[in-house]
Image: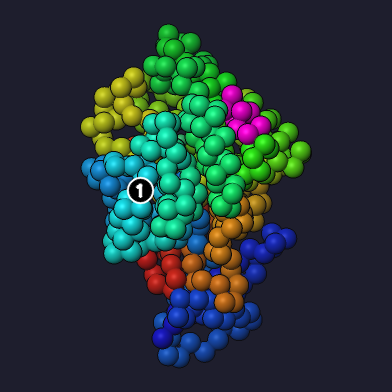
Amino acid sequence: MGIWILNAAVVTADNTQTTKHILVEGGIIEKIAEGAAPDTAGHTAIDAQGKLLTPGLIDMHVHLREPGFEHKETIATGTRSAARGGFTTIACMPNTRPVIDTVETVKYVLDKAETEGIVRVLPYGCITKNELGRELTDFDALKAAGVIGYTDDGVGVQSAQMMKDAMAKAASIGMPIIAHCEDNTLVEGAAVSEGEFARKNGLKGIPNESEAIHVGRDILLAEATGVHYHVCHVSTEQSVRLIRHAKQFGIKVTAEVCPHHLILSDEDIPGMDANWKMNPPLRTPRDVQACIEGLLDGTIDIVVTDHAPHSEEEKARGMALAPFGIVGFETAFPLLYTKFVATGQWTLQFLVDKMTKLPAEVFGLPWGKLEVGAAADLTLIDLETEKAVDPAEFASKGRNTPFTGWKLKGWPALTIMEGKVVWSE
Ligand SMILES: NC(=O)N[C@@H](CC(=O)O)C(=O)O
Ligand SMILES: [Zn+2]
Ligand SMILES: [Zn+2]
């Protein structure tokens, strides 16, 4: 017995919407029909009238916190949060405790995801042991165990030689390096960006160069080694410029941006509230504009959430002491839909591609497609109903968002992973 999804609006390559009926069976998309509703005898039927159907959303940068920080999130709660946000494939960062730098930790995460997770979890492995920047991990063994790339997310690889060695090794086995770009000598002790907010409050700021210096360095190292180099959470005008330039020269660089860096600047921070503290920090309006332009012209390839849950107690320590990070799964699509698509600045297809087809293409993954024979990873989205962001409703353990109370449209209504309904409103 399968599931017929009837009367769904599907957006096609030229951004037109057509009504389709889709039969999901045996974990794959079995049929796609148009015109009169088909006979659904022997199957479950879901009427999707008035809703958008997209491939399951893909998020290539998330923190699930397991093992070690289960008070912030677990694979069980994190994948439920992802499903509620419309995501069916998520790639998790290795800055857990212990970090994911051995075959055993990779297996631990994959086993947990299999038994307790409800969406597909793809782990990254660390570049360096313990993310300390001193010694490379065993790239071959981690690859064999199932990691999809290497990253020390949470911290930048400070040594250029270490990064070059990592890239050379990754290139030799056809794997990507995913980089959190941050030069530690420029950021010490700062919680927010160098900008209006820091000036007004007499705070030390995190300068744009702390990110862009690593982006520039790593682009040169990627050119020298031939690796696929992916830049995490781009937030500065300078980084966008460097990546654009590198792409013009045919260097194999790709990049991601988070919704908050496309929507908020440091001038929006209302006060010393750590729900506005994340790494990289909110930058100037000019940086926000550069990130938007970078996404539009293809310099930035994809959107990710950098879902980074922390407990209320941790965030209550205040701007200076609280950990960096905000949750992202359950607001990502509605935020971008409301801000950019509903206002006519982006096409719906552009947004959907940046969260489905393109992340799959960038990382060589088989998902993100709405076609017969593809995995039945599907998301139904209500584009009409307006609702305020209420962190109390989150499936995530994290409530740390700056978007509380924002009135948004574009809420996911139903998420199907490999033919199974994993979340329904
Ligand atoms: N983005 C954040 O502010 N925090 C992330 C780390 C990271 O993505 O660098 C976290 O693990 O909490
Ligand atoms: Zn990071
Ligand atoms: Zn991260």
Q: Residue at x 31, y 53 (%)?
A: 104
Q: Is residue 260 above or below residue 93?
A: above
x, y percent for residue 276 = 40, 29
Measured as percent of width and height from the top left, residue 55 is found at: 54, 64
| Left or right of residue 121: residue 171 | right
Q: Is mark 1 within 8 Å of ligand 1?
A: no
Q: Determine the residue located farthest toward the top in the rendered image.
A: 202
- On-image quarter of the C terminus: bottom left
Quadrant that contains the N terminus? bottom left
Residue 57 within the segment the image draws in magenta: no
**Magenta span has 214?**
yes
- For the record, the magenta segment spans 212-221
Q: Position of residue 72 (x, y in %)?
A: 27, 42
Q: Residues within 10 Å of mark 1 (few under 14, many from 20)?
A: many
Residue sitting at x 55%, y 86%:
38
Question: Against 33, is 179 above or below?
Answer: above
Q: Residue shown at 47%/48% (left/top)?
A: 139
